[in-house]
Structures are given as structure tokens and as C-alpha cells.
Amino acid sequence: MQARALRSRRDFLKVSALATGGMLVAVTIPGIGRRAIAASTDAPFAPNAFIRLTPDGTVTVVVGYSEMGQGVLTAVPMLVAEELDADWSRVRFEQAPSDPVYKNPLFGIQATGGSTTVRASWQPMREAGATARAMLIAAAARRWGVSPQECHTVAGRVVHADGRSLAYGELATDAAHEPVPTQVALKDPRQFRILGQSLDRLDTPLKIDGSGRFGIDVRVPGGYTAVLARPPVPGAKPRHWNAAHAKSLPGVKAIVEVPGGIAAVADGYWNAKKARDALDVQWDLGANTAYSSDGIRRTFLALAQGSGTVARQDGDAAAALHGPTATKHLDAVYEVPYLAHACMEPMNATASVTADGIDVWGSVQAPGAIQQALAAAFHLKPDQIRVTTTLLGGGFGRRFGLDYVFDAAFVSKAVGAPVHVMYPREDDMHAQFYRPAALLRFDAALGRDGMPVALRMNTVCASIAKAAHMPLHDGIDSFAVEGLTACPYRIPNLRIEWSESEPPYSVWFWRSVGHSQNIFFVEGIVDELAVAAGKDPYEYRRDLLGGAPRYRGVLELAAEKAGWSKPPAPGRHRGIAVGESFGSYVAEVAEVSVGPDGAVKVHRVVCAVDCGRVVNPRIVERQMESAIVYGLSAALYGRITIEHGRVQQSNFNDYPVVRIDEMPQVEVVILPSTENPGGVGEPGLPPLAPAVVNAIYAATGKRLRSLPIDTGALRRA
Amino acid sequence: MYTLHVNGKTHSVEVTPDTPLLWVLRDTLNMTGTKFGCGEALCGACTVHLDGVPVRSCSIPVSAAAGKHVTTIEAVGATAAGRAVQKAWLALDVPQCGYCQSGQIMSAAALLARKPAPTDADIDAAMAGNICRCGTYNQIRAAIKDAAADLGHGG
């Protein structure tokens, strides 16, 4: 199972690496664009792979990105529609097939993640729209016998200076014969009438009546459903299983062994799961039963006490920590556990392996990676792998993993029929791909003025880059140290180290990735420094952020909106934190109370974000709120633990998440900016946990340095 | 053989008696709007109405649903409360990934059918069984209040 996952990841990365810097987008190369759409459309005007215009005036924007809640099926059409000058009420979306023309220019393959969609689409999708607009103008000018310079466009119409006008739909057939311009001018942002508006999401109607199709809803004629018995400990091998009994149960088609485990294949989920449960697999558990969370922690702690590979060095922290200007010393250990993504839609995928290739349908973040990886594993060409991306019931990085797609392909091949592999929630929880557990030791010294003289941090965690077969740089996994190395505070002597430790539990991208733990660490530490200096944590940060205006901008805005200068309501206490990730800057103020029993209630979170130019403010606000809730679940409850090599959590009873009755009031304010867009799906998450923990310190005087929050430590009795 | 009344239609299904209603809907009747989330009545994604009462269909065996009236997301819009809830959900653009929303809407519609003017505590009690990992809870609460106001005005 491990080998299979590795193979798929390696191939994925090979492709990404080759294409690094490949910003050349095919939007103005009609041949490539037309190839991708030729089979699927009879629209007369399809100037590129992203736009189709039919005579009735409907504009269909073909979106190559995966919709997992973050609004790409609306944001990408908005980018196109702005420069096309489309009538927004006539704009539709369509999910793209797998085709290199839909590659994410920031990854070099068709994939969605890293809060990249708007950043990746900002230029090419606007150019796609502008290209189509120019061709429509050219067609109208030709029909009227006038110069294109005499024409302009307004919401789906080409208008001549004399007032004549033609609707885009009326021009569709003619426009298709116009030459594709090689260069187009984009609007001055002050002319935007679609971008920057809180337009309703285009996918909402599908999501309120059950009609939206997710991966789990895929039904292929002649297909079966499979549930697998999987190794309970990493590396465990099946020794014996009762195939005959399982096969005799109602609806069961086959029992097959595949790299992922033993698959029970049946006429539907329930019968497949019952057959899986009846397999009674005996496992050779192997040596990994020796692993436990406590043991992993001891290993991490020992490594943290030593030295790691240096990821950033300013000045000489070792000397300055004990130098003459250091008047106050602090040191402590911070730590966070493994986390599961717990997407609402458990992992599942449908595959059909036939002589001429493989069809895959499902909730996937990386159709391009699936094409590359399945082609390599099954000795096919990438274009023989056809991936149909559905709506995703949550992604959060998990659906960049290919394990469940490989399961479906292997089982389909074994039984010679289309197969839908389903992970029961327990399988989903056990399948790993976890946010790495991490432990960081810091040593800090303050000067006489209370300002930091030196800070040394050594963080210990497994490498996501290695798990994904991406390169390290100078021995550093950037995912392990992101959020640490970017430390924006004025600290003259700063040393950041990474110590790698690789327990056998696979780690993976989890919403905001390394920032999820590292900004918790830094923002806790800076709060401790402020307390040690006897200063207000907001003012202290502000002073240290003099050279970082975008950090300081959101910090000040969050403090202002939260009323930092005035005391909170009786019984409530505030904490603040700030961080940058994926090109966006976010500060959050949490207002909490702590009960006598230690119970933590988060009443209110104020969030200020600078994400550059904003495509859809409401989507930005909702993404910030979404990341806050996801981060709050992790801060309050999130913990995957290991005992005797086994993951102990299985479902929402022992991996609890925030529910509506625990939901804080959330206020998001967007800092106006003319910078290029930053990401929005993830950056709201990292400041949440430190803001809450810093507020708990304000409430109780107790400094929590590990997550999830230990309410037992806060009990006053 | 079990007889189910689903959204006003009668179906005869041949499944084992322990088959949860969820899988009869999804796999036998091919009605995929009702979602699978946990299989243990912990997340609410599979919520349907059984004789008007919200239940977790992943944990109701078909034998217990036989002869009863099942309403799912596909038909909840035919009820006054369901229609008002869907309208409010659309107006406030509640869903993000959307996967849990069938269950959220079924729980909200059942709440409003029973309590046309729910308090925040009523909303907490009725909706705390429905998890949303995208964190749309504040929009859900606002939409339930809007739907309640809409129902009040509409009579």
C-alpha cells in the first residue's frame, strides 16, 4: 500500500517539477483549446478551452479547478466574465474534463490546492475573456462595416458609437471565424463591474436540493461497490482471510486482494461492507506495533533538544542568547498532534479499467496527477486516463492523495468491471495522510528594553515534501518550516532549525499545511515574549512589525475592529495573532471565557485579511470564517493518537469537531488592497489557535503550549 | 421485500432487513441527494424525515422504515417549511462544499415544521447533530431565522 502511494506521489511530483515556472498558458493557442472541447460541444464560438458562447447568449465557462467549497466554480467564471464583459445572468459553469490545457500554471498539472486557483487564474482567465471579447467586437465591426475601434461592449452586447448594438449570441457564429488575437489589453481595475462584487455563487442551486453530484453519487452501469479490509498498522500484511464465507453473503460479487488490502466487491455499499467485516482477516502486524504517541513524542523531544538543519539564520542566535545584551531568558516546548482532515464526504472513487484505458470519476483535487500516476502504474499513456471531476465533499488537501483512486483502479482491474471504492468513516479516519505531529523547542532572550535579542527554534516533524516526493532545498522541507522562516518580527539574532523524524504514519497536506502548526508556535512564543517584557501583546507585535506593513496593516485593523483598546465584556478575555500564508495576511482576535471546570468558550473571532485584490468579497469572508471553524475544531479537539501502532480514533465520537452550538460570532473585515490576489482557502486558519490560546492566557494566566487545548489544565478547583 | 413510501411514491425493495434506509435510498432507489457521512448517526448528513420526524437514515434499518412515509431532500421543497428553508439557503448562499447541506436542510425543515419561530436554543438543539466541516453554521442559523420569518409572513 505504501509503495503504491509513493509511486503515485513520485510521478505527480516529476510532472510538477518539470513544469515549474511554466506560466505559458494555452488560452491564446486555439488549437490546443479546441482539442479539449471538440468532443463535448456544438457551441459555434469556442475561442479557447475555457469559453463557449451559444446563439442564445449563454456563456459557459469551463473550469479546470476542483470545487470543494472554496467557490472556484463562481470565482473563475467571474474572472472570465469581467474581461468578456458578459451579462452575468447568462454565465454558467461547467467542470472541465482532464486535459493538460486545464493545468494549474502554478503547479504545471491540473490540480487544485495551496489556495492557488484565483492566483493561478487571475491573468490567464481574464485574458481568455478579453480574447473572446475582441473576437466578438471584430465580428460585429465586420458585419457593420465599421472599425473595431468604434465599438465597445456592455454586459453581453457589442455597441457601436452610433448606438447600434448586437447581442453576443447573435455574433457567436461569426466570431468563430475571426482570427484569435495574440495580444489583448486588460481593463483598468477601476473599470471592474463584476470583480469585487459579492455575486451569488453559481453552484448554490445544486447544493440545496440534492441534485449536485459528488464522487459518492457516481453510478456507472454494470458497476459494483467495494469496501476494503486495510492494514490496521502501517506495513501489516494479510495472512489469512475467510473469502469463502464473505463471498457467500448476499449481493457479493468477489473477494480480491489488491495492494490496498482485501476488497469485498458487492452490489452496493451495505453488502460490500458486511462482506468486508465478515472477512475476518488475520494480519501479520510487523514491527510497527511498537509505535505509540508517547514514544513518538519522546523521540521528537530528544531531537528538539539537539540541533537540526538550519532553515534561516540572521545574526548569531547562539552567541546572543548568552551575550551581554540578553537580560531575560525564556525557553519551552510547543507541540501539536497528528490531525485527520475528516472531510464530510469520506474518501471514495469510481474507476473502470478497460483495454483502452482507465476512466476515473470522483471527488479529486488533482486530475493531472491521477493521469500521470495511473499511466505509470498501469503502463498507459496519460491521455488514456480520463478523469471526471465531480463536486468534492470537502478537500482540505486530503483529496490531493491518490490512495482511494488507486484502490478503485486496482479493484476494477481485478474484477473486470467498473468499481466504486468506498471508505467507511472509520477507514477514512485510519487512512493517515495526516497533518504531521510536530514539536518545537525555543530559546529566547530579551534585552533591557524588553525587545527580543535572540530567538532560536528547532522544530521536529516528518517531511510532507518527502511523502509527496517533492525536492528538499538545502536539506530543508519548506512545508516543515513555512510560517517559521517567514517570521516577520524584528529579531536581530534568529535561528530556525528543522529536525526530521519519520514515524511510519504518512503525512500530507492539511488545510494551511506547515503554517497550521508553525504560526501557532511563533504567535504563542511572541505572546510569551510580550508578557515577559511586561507589554501589551498587540502593541508589542506592532512595534516588532515596523518593517512588515502588510502584517501590521491587518494587525491594526483586527485590533481596531475588536475594540482592543477597550476592555471586553466581564468574564471575557482577548488574544491576538497574525500570520501570512499563501500570499495573504490575516490577523485574528479571539474573545474567550474559561469556566471553573476549565471549559473554553470562544464567543467571538474578529478577522482582518489582506488578500490583495478581491474577486468576490463574500466568498473571501466565508472562506475566512470556514478556516476559523476548521482551525477551532483542531484547537479544541483535533488529535489523532497512536497506541500499539494503531490509530485510536475512528469516527466523530472520538474525533469531535465544532458543532453549531459551539460556533463563535465571526466578523471578517477585508483590508482594501491593489496587490495581486493572494489565496483565501487556507490563510484564515493559522492565526486562530494562537489567538485562542493567547486569550486563554489572558483569562487564566496559564500558557498552553500544546494542542488540542487541555481543559483539565485550566480547571480551577 | 419491504414497502417504502418515499416522497409520495411507493416502492417495493428486496434487501436484507438490516440494510439501513440510507443505502436503500442511495443504492437501491438511486436517490443520491441523501448523503453518507459517518454510518453511526454522529454527523447528520443522512437526515431524512420518517413520518415527518427527522432521523439519521444511516442508522434506521429498512425493516423499521417499512410502511412509513419517507421524505428526502429531493422532495422537501414540496413542503412549506422545506420550501422556505431552501429559499433562505439560496438567498444567503449558505453552502460551501455542499455535502452536508441535504442533512442540514432536512433538520432545519423539520424544526420549522414543528416550531415556526425557533429561538437560538431551539436551533442549537435541532441542528447540533449536523456537522459542517466548511463551518457554515452562522449562515445556517441566519437562514433558519429568515425562513421562519418568511413562513410567518406567508401564513
Image (spheres, coloured by chain):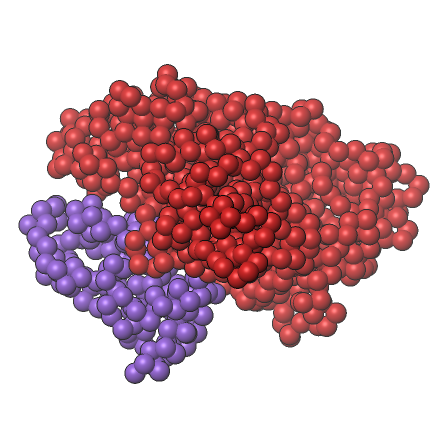
Chain colours: A red, B purple
Q: Residue at x 75, y 33 (%)?
A: A312
Kindly give the residue lying farthest to the right in the view shown.
Answer: A324
The x and y percentages for residue B27 are 20, 45
Could you tell me which quadrant the N terminus of chain A lies in? Answer: top left
Location of residue A86 with respect to A563 vertically, above or below: above
Location of residue B11 with respect to A433 vertically, above or below: below
Name the quadrant containing residue B145.
Answer: bottom left
Location of residue A262 with respect to A201 vertically, above or below: above
* Foreground pick, B109 / A359: A359
* Foreground pick, A385 / A607: A385
Kindly give the residue lying farthest to the left in the view shown.
Answer: B1
From where the camera sits, is residue A136 visible?
no
* Foreground pick, A117 / A341: A117
Location of residue B75 with respect to A10 vertically, above or below: below
The x and y percentages for residue A267 are 18, 37
Kindly give the residue lying farthest to the front in the view shown.
Answer: A145
**Residue A125 left/right relative to A40:** right
